Amino acid sequence: MSSVPSPKGRPRDPRSHEAIVSAAIELLIEVGYAATSIGAVAARAGVGKDTVYRRWRGKPELVFEAVFTTTDQAPIPDTGTLAEDLTALLQGLIDEFHAPAAAAALPGLLADFTADPVLKSRIRSDFLAPSKERLLVVFQRAVARGEIAADTPVDLVLDTLAGAVFFHVGLVGQDPDRELAGRLAAVIAKGIEIR
Amino acid sequence: MSSVPSPKGRPRDPRSHEAIVSAAIELLIEVGYAATSIGAVAARAGVGKDTVYRRWRGKPELVFEAVFTTTDQAPIPDTGTLAEDLTALLQGLIDEFHAPAAAAALPGLLADFTADPVLKSRIRSDFLAPSKERLLVVFQRAVARGEIAADTPVDLVLDTLAGAVFFHVGLVGQDPDRELAGRLAAVIAKGIEIR
């Protein structure tokens, strides 16, 4: 793991990166978003605050990466129908928003993103980009099957799906029943289908 | 405006209530939600902090009342069709979430509500109750016209509408185009209609 020092300084130790991310997740679950400060994360990870700041601009950036970028490795659903594909996408969103660290982080994280002009402009690209890519593929197949029109508004549908899950699962914190993804997908699919 | 002192202490001056609410709205627009503290609001209103705390349990309760309880005086739409009624309801939500003070307050307010166990249980009743009542009336008429089934899930549809507006208007802060309410209403209406 040790490397020859370069003129730019010590190369970053990947173990620190993992320790910091794990510490952030633990603290989010233990004490919630507000109390998960950079200082608390650094202490839990056994590193200095500067070590954290060398990798992340601030708390929202760190928490976002810790909580929301380990997903979307799952294959894009291809069930043969739009409604079933949307059901699978929605179940992914529900699982993601309902995971303990994400549930603890999401409202405060959204608040910090919107309050920072630099981050606010990145909400759509940071939070929603992976889901948008997956939805685009699902839509392309649905267009090819004649289920929806080519000009179906992707951003609006994505905001509707993400917003519905955020309100229904993320805000109230109720355990989502196993029918939620299917019911919401059925409504949206029927709402945008042209056949 | 002055009253005879009672054994319980000075009766509350309604001018203080209005001054505090106005001060909160001004500060939200000027400095954002995080900086709109009870102290800053009290100073702007020309009252002591105890005067504020006598009326509101804390900052989230004050901001919520200042921003979100002056609406819903408009008559419940009765256009004759579900899609048009939903369009009117959605336009109301869009106008409400997009107003300057609300736009500044909403993400941080939701974060504070979810972080406080007392308030978290009141999210659905505080934030969404007025809209839910209006949606119920709209749904009852749609059931009577045979447009939707009597067991159409009100909470899920409401969360979907509010969530869509929150993500599409409240988070990114984009000026909503004049077609948004109609497009979203059309999708949802078509999604839940049974005829």
Image (spheres, coloured by chain):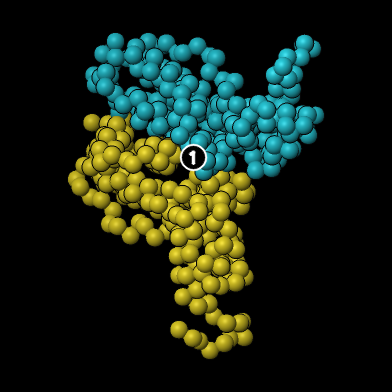
Chain colours: A cyan, B yellow
Question: Does the image show residue A119?
Answer: yes
Residue type at mark 1 is Pro
**Residue B76 position within the rendered picture, expressed as x and y whole percent measured from the top left:** 28, 53
**Residue A91 position within the rendered picture, expressed as x and y whole percent measured from the top left:** 50, 23
A62 with respect to B180 (left or right): right
Q: Residue furthest bottom?
A: B4
**Residue B148 position within the rendered picture, expressed as x and y whole percent measured from the top left:** 29, 36
Secondary structure beneath label 1: helix
- Residue drawn at the location 30% of the way across and 35% of the way down: B184
User: A85 or A60: which is nearer to us?
Assistant: A60
Residue position marked by numbered label 1 in the rendering: A117
- Residue drawn at the location 49% of the way across and 58% of the way down: B27
Chain letter of mark 1 equals: A
**Residue A139 position within the rendered picture, expressed as x and y whole percent measured from the top left:** 35, 17
Check disc 1: other Cα within 10 Å, few if <14, some if 14-19, many if 20+: few
In the displayed structure, B112 sits above or below B24; it is above
Snapshot quadrant of residue A188: top left
